[in-house]
Amino acid sequence: MNSAIKWRIVSLQAFLVVVLAGAAVFAYGLGTFTTSQIRDELTAQQVYFPGADQIKAAGALDPRSSRRRSATRRATRSPTATRPGSTPTTSSASTFRVSPTA
């Protein structure tokens, strides 16, 4: 391998390092900008989220909570189904069938 090819490879590697470093700086700056914009908007709208110390096990934010599972179910109208735990009625306008989304 002659010296001209070695210098070409080294210069291409240096160029690639500069391009990748520039892309990393751009991505970091874009992430920081987006985070600050979202934080500023939520603060202006007075939207706050509970801290990690305020989340309790089996609370509303626990993914294993039965309340959360029931909130993700989809209710569809069906003329033959009733609400769970109720007695069947003759009116089909007020009946629902609850089907899991998963």
Image: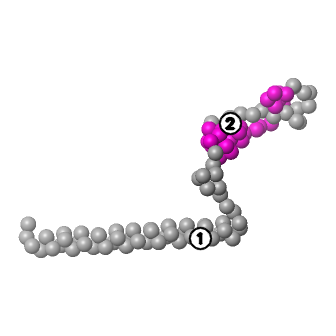
Q: Please, what is the three-letter code of the amino acid marked with disc 2?
A: Ser
Q: Residue at x 57, y 70 (%)?
A: 36
Residue 22 to residue 89: above or below: below
Tag 2 residue: 66
**Residue 90 percent coordinates (x, y):** 92, 27
Name the one closer to the observer, 68 or 52. 52
**Residue 47 percent coordinates (x, y):** 69, 63
Q: Is residue 72 visible?
A: no
Q: Residue at x 85, y 33 (%)?
A: 95
Tag 1 residue: 37
Magenta-drawn segment: 57-86
Q: Residue at x 65, y 58 (%)?
A: 49
Q: Quadrant of residue 28?
A: bottom left
> SS at mark 1?
helix
Mark 2, mark 1: which one is toward the viewer? 2
**Residue 13 percent coordinates (x, y):** 24, 69
